[in-house]
Image (cartoon, rainbow, N blue to C red):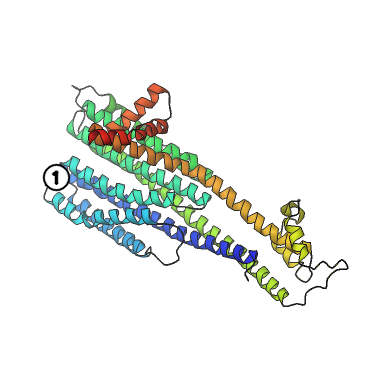
Amino acid sequence: MKSGLSFLVAARQCEIDELEQLAGTSALAHVLGQLVHELQRERGASNLFVASGGQRFAEQRRRLIAASDQAVRDARACFDQLEPQAGYPGSRARLFSRIAYALHGLDALAGLRQRVDGLALAPSEVIAAYIKLIASLLAVVFEAADSATDPEISRLLVAYFNFMQGKEIAGQERAAGAAIFASGQASSTQQQQLLNLIDAQERCLQTFGNFADHEALSLWRTSQAGQTLADLERMRRIACTAGQASRLDAEQSTSWFDCCTRRIDAMKQVEDFLAQQLRQLCKQKISQARGELLAHERVLQALAQQEDMPSAPPSASGAAAEAVPLAAFFDSGDPVRSAGTNAGAGVLSNLHGYGPQMERAILEMMQEQSHRLQSMSDELNTVRAALHERKVVERAKGLLMAHRQLTEEAAYRMLRQTAMEQNRRLIEVAESVLALENYLTTGKN
């Protein structure tokens, strides 16, 4: 018959399985980060290639496509390692669904490139196509963060995802600003789009700052110091404040593009640092869990040996030795405090004697496990609140887009403006919109 300690060992093994699965998912996030970066570079070159009528960036684009293809192969190899396995813990349905959609986009990449080669798309269409593909890859990283079961790893994944999202929006800003300068004038629509992208970056980077550790934040702040950011802020002001009749220097398009590229490359260094932190944290967590599992298994083996020893004789009152565990289990004292702090040592030191000390030590191990899992659950709920807010806002945007015929940017502006006017949080407004989903759907039908 299995003891409580047997299931404690089994629980620890399940944790290790989950951590190893999470380590694989975190590795996938890093590989996708590299792919996104290469696609961002390819997007920039493709945009300039089309905008110039095929006269510029042809050779650079070919080199960037080769780099993207290698990143695609790496991502596909990582996807192949995530084949569903019998007995794997947790549900991965959403993650696999996101991967399926991303793979569909990667399969269509060759066709997109052919259309760019033939100048069959406008620059705005090129940008939109790459944005859609990159968004599908970022959605995989989001699901990886949302499915994490360890709060420390989850916090780091949330920071990593939001930083990746902010970097992607920085890439979109690069394209939008380049189009403004290249055209020689800025329309109010273009200026509003640029302001929206700047604002969206700040939101992502603020969330990153809420979940990243001091070391990552320090690296990020250091990367933002210097002439690059000063130049970017200066050109942002020019693009966003130019009057409708003002003429912009078209030569500034290259300066803008190069400045944004330097900033994005600096962001990539921070992104790589976060990925390294993820790998190290997963490795540390798995090593620690395996060490604790080994200690539990040793105790279990020692107790199994004890079962082969003769039972203690009944006491003078006729009470059998089995009465001791019952008394210890229902003891009004706290097993954790009364048994000391080193559970493994406490048990092993009492292996050759019967009595309440042994059971108290085992109960201490079980209670410590329970407390630790509860603490992890509480912290995990806090971390996932940020992910939940994003999902709610995205759903509300989708509802407004479908029923009010709005663009994504317009839908978000409506949510944010309503929140400001009503002095409410954005998620509260989004939840109010979703509460009307059934009404809107019924009314439409």
- List x then y, in percent, for residue 97: 33, 55
Specify the farthest residue to the front.
318
Q: Amino acid at mark 1?
A: Leu
- List x then y, in percent, for residue 69: 26, 59
Q: Residues within 10 Å of mark 1 (few under 14, many from 20)?
A: some
From this view, report whether residue 189 is shown above or below residue 67.
above
Say which of 111 and 276 sits in front.
111
Mark 1 sits on what residue? 121
Residue at the (72%, 55%) spot, across then down: 341
Question: Considering the numbered disc 1 on the image, is that residue within a helix, a strand or a loop?
Answer: loop
Say which of 379 and 354 sits in front.
354
Q: Is residue 318 visible?
A: yes
- List x then y, in percent, for residue 93: 37, 56
Residue at the (30%, 46%) spot, across then down: 135
Residue at the (73%, 74%) spot, across then down: 306
Residue at the (28%, 24%) spot, across then down: 241
- 369 on left or right of 386: right
- List x then y, in percent, for residue 122: 15, 42
Corner quadrant of residue 171: top left
